Image (spheres, rainbow, N blue to C red):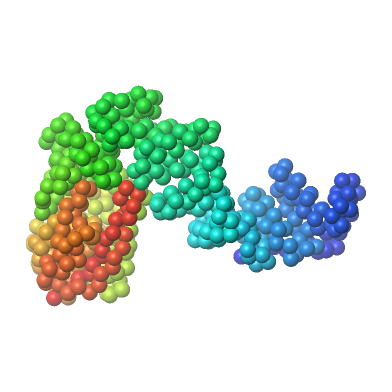
């Protein structure tokens, strides 16, 4: 932590004498306060209010040389040095203030702001919460906490904090603006439009992307409450010059509304989209999923077509929007048991996100995927000795006793009954080889096709179908976000008997 060197008292008194000689009102402030330190603080506040941050910091430091146990002066110094982009000094100053007075809500809020600027999110979150505990009506602390949680993609918690901020300060346009974005993420479309309208009423102009989001929210809500065709017809008038391509609106409405549980509306959209392109395997399968039709696996033509289309945006969508971290978590799980693998298989390798995580575990890595588009992205990323376009089960059956590690991150979610794949994986592994996989957890037993088009499985289904394996370890975890909320999942490590 940065050390702050206060001026010597003799230097400060020389400054006081100079100020008295040049600023008659400063002398009067000393007479009124009875001591130079409060007068120096008042002068520092005047400099601060007028944007003279260095002069203000000099006054506060001088005052502290005379009153080093004054927590308010340390907080003032923290605030002005932070305003001058000297956040390391600010952090030292505000921690000193809190050491002297740990029950001051304003000081905790200052620490929260400084830590936030330094991207120390854990310290910032703790400081915002301490501020609120000491002063529950601190609207700015609620909002700061909400914005921080928003960035951490803890959307439900962020929503609670922003709503608390508005309850204490209903005329803050930024809070309503944040509420609009959060409401959209959690599929409260009516609330989203209301919040954006209130932000605009409070003189916070909406930028074009936000206006587009508002138009989407109104259109999606109209779809839920009435006719999808009528809502699509009215969209252009709602969006005006900010309107997007209607096909994009319909596609995204289908995805968002199905994830949010509005399955009847999503099915209506899906039927309209399939009628436009009746031979589209992606539209057909996703509609089947929303309708809850029984299936044992996603069709190969769906997987190939969908991921070929999705490949260029796959990484940003999965990592930034959905907070996907399966490759890292699964590699850590494997490393906790064994390293030094001779030949590893990344089954359903996609764009190669797992390559960097797997390379430290062994000498040779093979990637297999059904999508040529995904394999092209994996080739650009590098890290594979071989990349193969093939269907997973067929490839495993053709690779007897070849691998000592099979790694399947987010690929088993496109299979319902895992029995055939697990038997094929056992054949492709050497005795004692490891198979690590991720699944989305089913609410009941067995497996189920979800409206997302992905299958969820129970641990019991894994145990009952993995008869050639010993279960070494299981770890429950959030797999991704869906409609802004965590999707429960499971990482499983198996050993070939």
Q: Is residue 50 left or right of residue 444?
A: right
In this view, 458 is above or below 303: below
Q: Image quadrant for the N terminus?
A: bottom right
Q: Image quadrant for the C terminus?
A: bottom left
Which residue is at the front of the view, 431 or 217?
Answer: 217
Q: Residue furthest right?
A: 21
Residue displayed at 68% across by 51% down: 80
Name the quadrant containing residue 263: top left
* Residue 122, image x, y percentages: 49, 61
Q: Is residue 215 visible?
A: yes
Which residue is at the front of the view, 233 or 471?
Answer: 233
Residue displayed at 91% across by 49% down: 21
* Residue 56, image x, y percentages: 74, 50
* Residue 108, image x, y percentages: 60, 59
Which residue is at the front of the view, 292 or 325?
Answer: 292
Q: Is residue 204 left or right of residue 26?
A: left
Q: Is residue 144 left or right of residue 362?
A: right
Q: Is residue 53 left or right of residue 142?
A: right
In this view, 433 is above or below 298: below
């Amino acid at each position: 932590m940065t050390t702050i060197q206060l001026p010597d008292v003799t230097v400060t008194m020389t400054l006081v004498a100079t100020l008295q000689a040049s600023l008659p009102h400063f002398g009067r402030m000393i007479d009124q306060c009875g001591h130079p330190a409060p007068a120096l603080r008042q002068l520092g506040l005047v400099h601060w209010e007028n944007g003279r941050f260095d002069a203000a910091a000099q006054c506060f430091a001088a005052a502290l040389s005379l009153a080093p146990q004054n927590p308010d002066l340390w907080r003032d110094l923290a605030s002005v040095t932070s305003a001058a982009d000297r956040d390391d000094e600010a952090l030292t100053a505000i921690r000193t203030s809190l050491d002297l007075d740990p029950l001051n809500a304003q000081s905790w809020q200052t620490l929260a702001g400084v830590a936030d600027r330094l991207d120390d999110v854990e310290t910032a979150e703790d400081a915002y919460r301490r501020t609120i505990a000491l002063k529950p009506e601190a609207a700015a602390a609620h909002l700061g906490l909400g914005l921080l949680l928003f960035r951490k993609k803890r959307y439900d918690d962020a929503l609670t904090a922003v709503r608390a901020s508005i309850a204490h300060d209903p005329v803050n346009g930024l809070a309503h603006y944040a509420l609009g974005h959060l409401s959209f993420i959690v599929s409260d479309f009516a609330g989203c439009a209301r919040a954006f309208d209130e932000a605009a009423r409070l003189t916070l102009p909406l930028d074009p992307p936000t206006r587009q989001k508002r138009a989407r929210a109104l259109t999606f809500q109209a779809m839920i409450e009435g006719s999808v065709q009528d809502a699509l017809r009215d969209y252009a008038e709602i969006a005006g010059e900010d309107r997007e391509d209607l096909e994009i609106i319909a596609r995204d409405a289908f995805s968002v509304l199905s994830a949010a549980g509005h399955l009847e509306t999503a099915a209506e959209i899906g039927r309209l989209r399939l009628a436009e392109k009746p031979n589209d395997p992606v539209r057909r399968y996703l509609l089947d999923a929303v309708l809850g039709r029984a299936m044992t696996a996603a069709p190969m033509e769906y997987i190939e077509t969908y991921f070929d289309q999705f490949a260029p945006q796959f990484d940003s969508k999965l990592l930034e929007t959905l907070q996907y971290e399966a490759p890292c978590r699964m590699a850590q799980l494997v490393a906790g048991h064994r390293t030094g693998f001779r030949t590893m298989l990344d089954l359903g390798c996609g764009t190669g996100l797992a390559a960097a995580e797997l390379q430290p575990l062994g000498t040779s890595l093979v990637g297999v995927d059904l999508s040529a588009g995904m394999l092209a992205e994996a080739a650009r990323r590098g890290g594979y000795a071989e990349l193969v376009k093939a269907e997973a089960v067929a490839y495993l059956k053709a690779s007897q006793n070849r691998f000592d590690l099979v790694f399947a991150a987010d690929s088993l979610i496109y299979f319902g009954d895992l029995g055939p794949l697990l038997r094929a994986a056992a054949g492709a592994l050497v005795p004692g080889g490891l198979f690590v996989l991720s699944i989305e957890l089913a609410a009941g037993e067995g497996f189920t096709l979800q409206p997302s088009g992905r299958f969820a499985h129970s641990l019991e289904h894994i145990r009952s179908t993995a008869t050639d394996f010993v279960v070494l370890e299981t770890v429950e975890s959030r797999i991704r976000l869906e409609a802004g909320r965590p999707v429960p999942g499971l990482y499983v490590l198996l050993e070939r008997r």
